[in-house]
Image (cartoon, grey):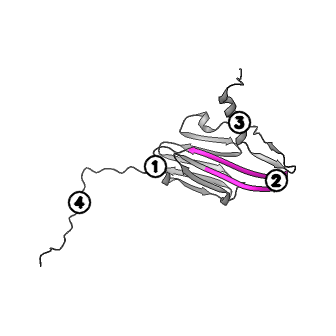
Amino acid sequence: MSFSQSSSYNRTYERKVIEETPRIRVATGAPFQITTPSFQPAPSILSGVGGAHNYHFGGTTGSFHSSDDSFNATIDLHDFKPEDLSVSVVGSQIVVEGKHPEKEDQLGSIQRHFIRKFNLPKSIPAESVNSNLSNEGRLVITATAPQKKEVAGATTIPIKIVPSENK
């Protein structure tokens, strides 16, 4: 298998993967990259829309299931406080962002930031998206399409009686 060094697609993809991996800053202040040994591409690369998927990419793990009428995602965010997280809908995507300031750990100090985007199924309105964070740091995002109302063959309209205007 040959690899084209001149392919802009490959270079762009490589750069994106490198940029999205977590960075750790050691006591000397020099950044270095941690590569994930069990790299698995994002679920959207593995298959089309729909079905249940597990993923580990860019320092976060989780699972999601998406169909025409429902969406469910679970993300392990135990390294973040609730105030460091945000969930929003931008266009047709659910955007989860987490960022915490630099803090000390056993290697020196660390600062984490990620943005995870999920495609929202077309039949699901943004208003139906809900998110819950457990005490263990699991963020669960759910959304469902509105139920279709049955259209009756005939609808009875009540007649309201109003007093006459004649005195």
Specify start and end residues of the magenta stretch as a single range. Answer: 96-118
> Which residue is the site of mark 4?
157
- State yes or no: residue 100 in magenta: yes
Instruction: Give percent across and percent down for residue 6.
Output: 70, 25
Q: Secondary structure at mark 4?
A: loop
Tag 2 or tag 1, which sits nearer the N-term? 2
Relative depth, front residue between 64 and 121: 121
- Residue type, label 2: Ser
Picture residue at 55% right of the left edge, 35% below the top: 48
Q: Does residue 1 lie above or below 146 as drawn?
A: above
Relative depth, front residue between 128 and 167: 167
Picture residue at 81% right of the left edge, 43% below the top: 32
> Which residue is the site of mark 2?
109
> Which residue is the site of mark 3?
15
Q: CA distance from mark 4 to mark 1?
A: 29 Å
Q: CA distance from mark 1 to mark 2?
A: 43 Å
Q: Nearer the viewer, mark 2 or mark 3?
A: 3
Badge 2 crowding class, 10 Å Cα cut-off, few under 14, some 14 to 19, many 20 or more, is: some
Q: Does residue 102 lie above or below 36 as drawn?
A: below
Q: CA distance from mark 2 to mark 3?
A: 24 Å
Q: Is residue 150 rendered to the left or right of residue 105?
A: left
- State yes or no: residue 31 in magenta: no
- Residue type, label 4: Ile
> Which residue is the site of mark 1?
145
